[in-house]
Image (cartoon, rainbow, N blue to C red):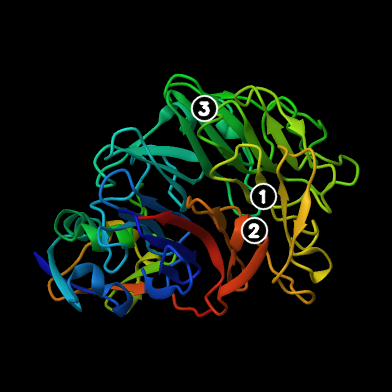
Amino acid sequence: MADRVVLCIGTKKGLFVAEASKSRGRFSLRGPFGSGVAVYSALIDTRKSPRIFASSCNAWFGMKVLTSSDLGKKFKETKSAPAFPETDGRVLANIWSLEPGTDNQEIWAGVEPASLFRSEDGGNSWEMIAGISNHKHSKDWQPGAGGLCLHTIVRDGERIHLGISTGGHYLSEDGGQTFNAANDGVGAGFDPNPYPEFGQCVHKIARHPDAPGRLYMQNHGGWPERPGIGVLRSDDYGHTWQSIADGLPSDFGFPIVVHPHDPNTIYVVPLEPMTRTCPEGKPAVWRSTSGGKKWKKLSKGLPKHDGYFTVLRDAMTTDTLADPAIYFGTTTGQVWMGHDSGDEWNCLFDSLPPINCVKVAVV
Amino acid sequence: MSVSVQIPYALRHECAGKSEVEVNAGSVQDALTDLKNHQPKLYRSVCDETGAVRKHINLYINETIIHRVDGLQKKLEPGDLLFIMTAVSGG
């Protein structure tokens, strides 16, 4: 019976694992694992016996994938990490996303420079997915501030959505054999063409498994002359997108998260676009229960002032308990938990290294 | 010809804690190939997937950095020491 809540916290200095009972009263912390090396992606794989995977990407000495089969008490390296073919010429710089595949041994990885890899043996060997990694557009993609990264993989059977910064949203409807840019309505504030075919700086894409045709996107907003392009919704499997930013204090942000039990309820963390920090130093998560038609500020328990942190694209998530909690990690090393679907917040940890990603599972 | 490769502290965990390993090599490139075959984790930390030496690593033969001589093609002589040198920083 699932009775533990496990958090994986990927930081600039390694991976931490926190664990609590279902009451979520007190989280114990262990780590760092992969000490000293940045962790940008983690996966708590609950398809069979729980396993944790985490990228451990050393810009000097190369890439590793760490795995644990005891809920993060010990980690070991998988036999290999994603790597480009020797004759390809590209060199892997980071692993931005780890997602479960169909079979319980299948894992997908989104990497920098923007490419997609798949493992069919639990991360011990990897193959590059040419349909997107060698896409005809790929030579024209440009790196954003975080690098040229394929950071989001959203799978729905044969349908696969990818988020690339800066490449945009790509959609496969044949299990990853081929991909097409699907950015109708996705703006690019930095491009002379406000709505290019591809090249947008998509920050994150999310959906609810019960509503596969409905997708939400946090795009690179914050452009005074092109307002509202930062927070978007699609109701046709990502073929077209519409703004849902009206009512937010800023349409710039990184994560976007869907409530585990309601496809109409979503969360964003609006940031001031020039500094990428909380507007006026007053952190808040904003929630919509109407698919983005209306928004409500959630700040009870969060700092009332002087809170100038950033919440990165994979640093917010939600557990799946009946009364779910929302979690986010900050670039100032705090982990916050929002009880009652985000109505009230408390700080779980306040002095970790800068946080890149937060993942949670009930196991 | 057996040549000793000196391992920096930062990479010793990639070769069971050893401070040096022996390779059978007549050139620097041979030495890297030997590491690829017999110390793959250490090799992966020294060279990327294209086979290039990573940019934060320098290789020395005795006290001479190899790019000042013939690079990876430099011949190794009996008694040479091949040093793997990593950049250092903090933060």
Mark 3 nearby-residue class (10 Å; few <14, some 14–19, many ≥20): some
Total marks placed: 3
Q: Is residue A221 left or right of residue A102?
A: right
- Quarter the C terminus of chain A occupies: bottom left
Host chain of mark 2 = A
- Name the kind of residue labelled 3 in the image: His
Please tell me in which quadrant of the rendered image residue A120 appears.
top left
Label disc, if present, on residue A342 of the rendered structure: 2
> Do the residues at pointers 3 and 1 share their chain?
yes
Task: Choose the circle earlier in sequence order: 3 or 1.
Answer: 3
Residue A303 lies in quadrant? bottom right
The percent position of residue A101, horizontal first and vertical second, equals: 36, 36
User: Is A9 or B75 nearer to us in this picture?
Assistant: A9
- Residue B13, position as x, y percentages in the image: 24, 72
Q: Amino acid at mark 2?
A: Gly
Is the residue under label 2 in contact with that under label 1 (CB below 8 Å)? yes
Q: Position of residue A336 (x, y in %)?
A: 59, 68
Task: Residue under label 3, please give it.
Answer: A135
| Chain assignment, label 3 | A
Q: Amino acid at mark 1?
A: Tyr
The reply to whether residue B71 is visible in this rendering is: yes
Q: Residue at x 85, y 46 (%)?
A: A247
> Residue at 83% across / 34% down in the picture?
A192
Secondary structure under badge 2? helix
Instruction: Name the foreground residue: A328 vs B49.
Output: A328
From this view, report whether residue A136 is shown above or below residue A23: above
